[in-house]
Amino acid sequence: MPNTKRRFFVRSAAVSVAVALGATALAACGSSDDDSEAESGPVSLTYWTWTPGMDKVVDLWNKGQGKKDQITVTVKKQASGDTLVTKILTAHKAGKAPDLVQAEYQALPTLVSNDAVADIASEVGDAKSKFADGVWQQTTLGTDAVYAVPQDIGPMMFYYREDLFKKYGLTVPTTWEQFAETARALKKKSPDTDLTTFSANDSGLFAGLAQQAGAKWWTTSGEKWQVAIDDAASQKVAKFWGDLVKEGAIDNQPMYTPAWNKALNTGKQIAWVSAVWAPGTLTTAAPDTKGKWAMAPLPQWSQSENVTGSWGGSSTAVTTDSEHKAAAAKFAAWLNTDGDALTALAKESGIYPASTSAQLSGAFTTPPDYFSNQPDFYTKAAEIAETTAPSAWGPNVNVAYTTFKDAFGKAAKNKSDFVSALTTMQDDTVADLKKQGFEVSE
Amino acid sequence: MKGAPYAHPSPTTTLKRARSAPYLFLLPATTLFLLFFALPIGYAIWLSFHKVKVSGLGLGAGARKEVWAGLENYTDALTDSELVDGALRVLGYGCIVVPVMLGLALLFALMLDSEKVRLAPFTRLAIFLPYAVPGVVAALLWGFLYLPDVSPFYFVLDRLGLPQPDLLDGGPLYLALSNIAVWGGTGFNMIVIYTSLQAIPAEVYEAAKLDGATPLQVALRIKIPMVAPSLVLTFFFSIIATLQVFTEPTTLKPLTNSVSTTWSPLMKVYQDAFGKGDIHAAAAQATIIALATLLLSFGFLRAANRRNKRDVSQGGAR
């Protein structure tokens, strides 16, 4: 399915849980000290990941650094995203989680809350300087602990058909207001063509757009969680897209369907708000339009701003069930900071690295094949990645995301009020937190 | 504990063995039943009476505890409008699927059984074949055909200047989903009915012919009443399959905004267990669905049996 294909090409995020957790909550978490003494004898580790080609990257470790340290890593290929979180939690219940797991940034609070991932601050703390602050913060949840090493990020960008923009006499929008004008202008010139669609089947897109607008969905104050999914910034984003759908300026059909592929491939939809991994998706969705697309920064809410959101992105975490946490942490740090490893990750798996130095390394001097017409693709991408707004994830992102799909799916279908769908999302998320027993401040 | 019981079994031990023999024969089946059926069900029920309690911010070790919930999960499930709506949606879906599928199955079986049929083995196979297509594949296949932008049907409709209904929305969605189930299930039910038609003794037909019955009369007065038990059976299977509908709507979901993640009750169970991570609520809902299925299907079987008995006794009295 197109959905999984997209996930192949890096889901990533940038930036972080702007969560200042009370130190009290953490007293219980500092647990990795028990095996920080040097490992002796050969160690073998299991690693659950969905990244394609990861086995080849791990081979580099097993034949090089790993051989020296007598640490062998075995890759067990898994389903992506939320499915893996469920699997990790189930395995953790039985005390049998693998040593290393891949986790999306927004899943980390859930994993930490279930005590499934270990604090590896003492082993990987030095790696901090290799990443942008916002990215690193997502793996610490704003605390002194470090729960994972960032692997890839997904700064959001605006993709458009360069040739068709010229044909219809459109200019690339730099603000959202211009974006709406562009959509209307296109409708006037070619009623059958849409600028883009509002899709309700990937919550990460809306979360990223809200993040760009300055939303912080989960924060804490003292011992209480604060949920602000329906804050002013998110409402602004919801209303903007809802109005466009309502007036018929853009389409309301979901992404990643055969119909969507065809719309992109035949020029029925001529732009896509996406992230750095888009070339991979476009390669499979719209193969005939290769070389006709271009990438630009995301439109801004005001002319003076320069900020983007993130959509996707993942990290490597060590589980609390691992008997060799220090060895596992060593591998996690190597995988995501070592030059050779990152080059291999870029080549074999097509990921966009979280490590700032790797973003401009040799693997990224040439643009993706699909974007051969835009030689500075990755230079631009690195510049955009730097402007990623901080994100704020909480312990029940899964619930909010599920509610999003249903509430916004319905609103998009009926062309009804998006803001009330946002309220549903807020209410369901708060209700779920309360039901579970979390302290929530209103 | 002395003596040599193995060499010379006393009459009493032989008797004991004879008495315990049936239990020994039952042992493998009972063990398997307990291990792989009763135990998981018991665990699900146990889960449904518990819930997770988080304290404070819920971060770190020991922040989560499994506590007794009593009937809380059950009251939540029964008052959850999504579950009730899902049940109603499935009811609407079942009202289309079951009569159409069984009606077609009966019709095809009767046609295949008639004397004038040509190419019977080929036709039988052709009708049965969709049953061999996995549900996910069938749903994907039809999903593509339902999408206006990629479907050849819509291309033809467009060329002919005919209206192009959106099959993935509103009322037509039920037809679209039912169509997949009917396409996939008719063959199986047809085979069941056809097999029991073949079992009707030839002398019955002979007698009917002598009495001057037309083929239509034979079908209505002899064949259908005589395959009634098969019809009851296929109806029973169909009800269960309808209540458990999951594959088709789940596969169509990514294609349209009209199918929510909780469209059918089982999808809601799946969503709560694996989407929201609330295995306890999911267990309670699963228990409720299982009970409802049991009640409905066995209720139907009992009603059908009672009718049968009454018919038989009435027939005898005549």
Image: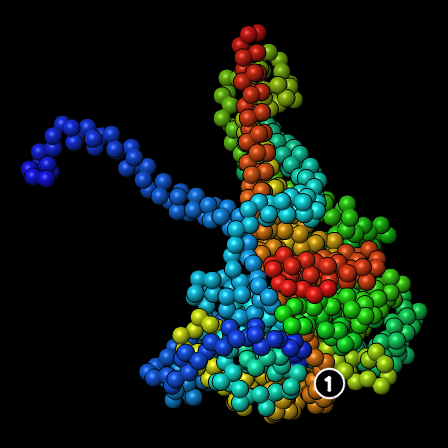
* Residue A232 in view, yes or no: yes
Residue picked out by circle 1: A387
Q: Residue at x 8, y 33 (%)?
A: B8
Q: Amino acid at mark 1?
A: Thr
- The part of the image, by quadrant, that contains residue A16 is bottom right
* Residue B125 in view, yes or no: no
B263, above or below A391, in the image: above
Of B64 and A270, nearer the camera is B64
Q: Circle 1 sits in a helix, a strand or a loop, which is it? A: loop
Q: Seen from this angle, which residue lies furthest left?
A: B3
Percent across and percent down for residue A108 are 58, 72
> Which quadrant of the figure contains the C terminus of chain B?
top right
Percent across and percent down for residue B234 are 57, 34
Of A223 and A354, nearer the camera is A223
Left or right: A256, with B9 as reference point: right
A336, above or below B205, in the image: below
Of B126 and A132, nearer the camera is A132
- The part of the image, by quadrant, that contains residue A302 is bottom right
Q: Residue at x 65, y 59 (%)?
A: A434
B59, above or below B104, in the image: below
Residue at mark 1: chain:
A
Percent across and percent down for residue B32 are 37, 44
> Which quadrant of the figure contains the N terminus of chain B?
top left
Q: Residue at x 50, y 17 (%)?
A: B203
